[in-house]
């Protein structure tokens, strides 16, 4: 079993300490996406499925969802768990994925940080876009408050240093808002919205153990005002027709 399959097999266990919080944060992510979708946006493709929380939300909202993951283990698990008639699973690396279909919405939630060459991956994905396609991309934020604090405490050398949890999850890079936007733009996409999801001054487990739902929702709402310092950052982008 290769390392990717090992990570996929243990993915849910690695998120057990913040499962409920994850669902709340992913719901905020999802709401950020659909705010920019119209009724004409119905055919969706998602790359990188994780534990299927976001995938399930997509299936409930859109007519057709193609769910792509590089790990066959993830496909096997989620194809049994997600009982939707409008979903099709495919096993493929992003860089190898080919299709003649043009999708209305492309979702890449927490996948770019796993890739050796994220620009190449985005260039490949752009071939699946038509003129009105929306692509949603989110990543963990190097400038999150909990990482800034970790540097001050000597737990991280730099905010973009990979910590043990990053390594366990197969992360290869931690993006700052600047490097994230630069990567997306270098791939030829045009960003039309940038945002953040939840101000996160503590680790996930500390938040789960010590915060009420009201506090969590307050810090999620604050993230709309302070995206550069959120735990996660995201962009919505389209094809650059000015090229």
Image (cartoon, rainbow, N blue to C red):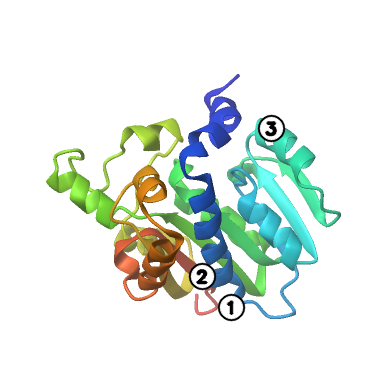
Q: Which element carries disc 1, helix, strand or loop? A: loop
Q: Mark 1 points at which residue?
A: 36
- Category of crowding for the residue at label 2, using alpha-carbon neighbours closer than 10 angstroms: few (below 14), some (14–19), many (at least 20): many
Query: In the rendered view, would you say 118 is above or below 179?
Result: above
Q: Mark 2 points at which residue?
A: 236
Q: Tell me if 96 is positioned left or right of 87 in this view.
A: left
Query: In the rendered view, would you say 162 is above or below 234?
Result: above
The residues tagged by marks 3 and 2 sit, at their Cα atoms, a distance apart of 28 Å
> Can the viewer see residue 76 in this picture?
yes
Q: Name the residue under label 3.
A: 72
Q: Nearer the viewer, residue 118 or 224?
A: 224
Which of the image's four quarters has the N terminus?
A: top right
Q: Nearer the viewer, residue 191 or 214?
A: 214
Q: Which element carries disc 3, helix, strand or loop? A: helix
Q: Which element carries disc 2, helix, strand or loop? A: strand
> What residue appears at the point 44 percent right and 62 percent down from the top-left corner?
184
Q: Tell me if 53 is positioned left or right of 140 in this view.
A: right
The reply to whether the C-beta atoms of the residues labelled 1 and 2 are less than 8 Å apart is yes
Name, please, the residue furthest toward the top: 1
Q: Tell me if 1 is positioned left or right of 204 in this view.
A: right
- Category of crowding for the residue at label 1, using alpha-carbon neighbours closer than 10 angstroms: few (below 14), some (14–19), many (at least 20): few
Q: What is the x, y in percent for residue 185?
A: 42, 66
The residues tagged by marks 1 and 2 sit, at their Cα atoms, a distance apart of 8 Å
> Can the viewer see residue 100 in this picture?
no
């Amino acid at each position: 079993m290769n390392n990717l399959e090992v990570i996929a097999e243990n993915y849910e266990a690695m998120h057990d300490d913040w499962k409920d919080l994850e669902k709340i944060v992913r719901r905020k992510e999802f709401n950020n996406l659909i705010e920019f979708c119209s009724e004409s946006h119905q055919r969706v493709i998602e790359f990188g499925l994780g534990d299927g929380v976001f995938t399930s939300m997509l299936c409930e909202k859109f007519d057709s969802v193609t769910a792509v993951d590089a790990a066959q283990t993830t496909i096997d698990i989620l194809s049994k768990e997600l009982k939707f008639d409008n979903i099709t699973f495919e096993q493929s690396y992003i860089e190898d994925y080919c299709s003649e279909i043009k999708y209305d919405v492309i979702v890449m939630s927490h996948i770019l940080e796993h890739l050796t060459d994220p620009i190449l991956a985005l260039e490949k994905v752009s071939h699946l876009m038509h003129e009105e396609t929306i692509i949603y991309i989110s990543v963990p934020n190097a400038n999150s408050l909990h990482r800034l604090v970790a540097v001050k405490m000597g737990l991280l050398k730099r905010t973009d240093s990979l910590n043990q949890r990053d390594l366990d999850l197969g992360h290869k890079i931690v993006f700052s808002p600047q490097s994230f936007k630069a990567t997306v733009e270098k791939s030829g996409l045009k960003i039309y919205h940038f945002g953040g999801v939840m101000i996160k001054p503590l680790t996930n487990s500390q938040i789960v153990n010590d915060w009420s739902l009201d506090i969590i929702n307050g810090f999620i709402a604050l993230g709309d005002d302070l995206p550069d310092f959120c735990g996660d950052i995201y962009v919505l982008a389209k094809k650059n027709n000015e090229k």
